[in-house]
Image: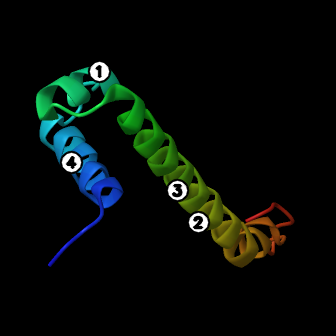
Amino acid sequence: MHITRYTDYSLRVLMYVALKGEEISTIGEIAESYDISKNHLMKVVQELNLVAATGWTFAFALFTLIYWPILTRPRADGRPG
């Protein structure tokens, strides 16, 4: 199976960050660890960040559409939720 260099770098970033756990990882640190160009890695991380932010936004929008009406409708005693 062949994967693109971009996919390879994306997987390496995700694995590196997963193995570090709660520690902060820098692009320079990851680039040095895998001997990858820092500029290429910056593009990959930017795209991963965009995908993560979009996923979070979608999940929040879905939650809002489904649960907000339930959480805000008045109860029998007149209070919301």
**Front of the two marks 2 and 1:** 1
For badge 3, the amino acid type reads Val
**Front of the two marks 2 and 3:** 3
Inter-mark Cα distance, 2 to 4: 25 Å
Q: On screen, 26 above or below 47?
A: above
Residue occupying the point 14% across, 35% down = 34
Looking at the image, tell me whether mark 1 or mark 4 is earlier in sequence order: 4
Q: Which residue is mark 1?
A: 28
Q: On screen, 14 above or below 24?
A: below
Q: Which residue is mark 4?
A: 12
Labels 1 & 4 near each other (Cβ < 8 A): no
Looking at the image, tell me whether mark 3 or mark 1 is earlier in sequence order: 1
**Front of the two marks 3 and 4:** 4
Residue occupying the point 55% across, 61% down = 55
Task: Tell me: 61 left or right of 37.
Answer: right
For badge 4, the amino acid type reads Arg
Residue occupying the point 29% across, 55% down = 5
Secondary structure type for disc 2: helix
Task: Tell me: 78 left or right of 66.
Answer: right
For badge 2, the amino acid type reads Ala
Q: Which residue is mark 3?
A: 51
Residue occupying the point 84% across, 70% down = 74
Q: Which residue is mark 2?
A: 59
Inter-mark Cα distance, 2 to 1: 31 Å
Q: Nearer the viewer, residue 57 or 76?
A: 57
Labels 3 & 1 near each other (Cβ < 8 A): no
Looking at the image, tell me whether mark 2 or mark 1 is earlier in sequence order: 1
How packed mark 4 is, by other alpha carbons closer than 10 Å (few <14, some 14-19, many 20 or more), is: some
Inter-mark Cα distance, 3 to 1: 21 Å
Q: Position of residue 44 (x, y in %)?
A: 42, 45
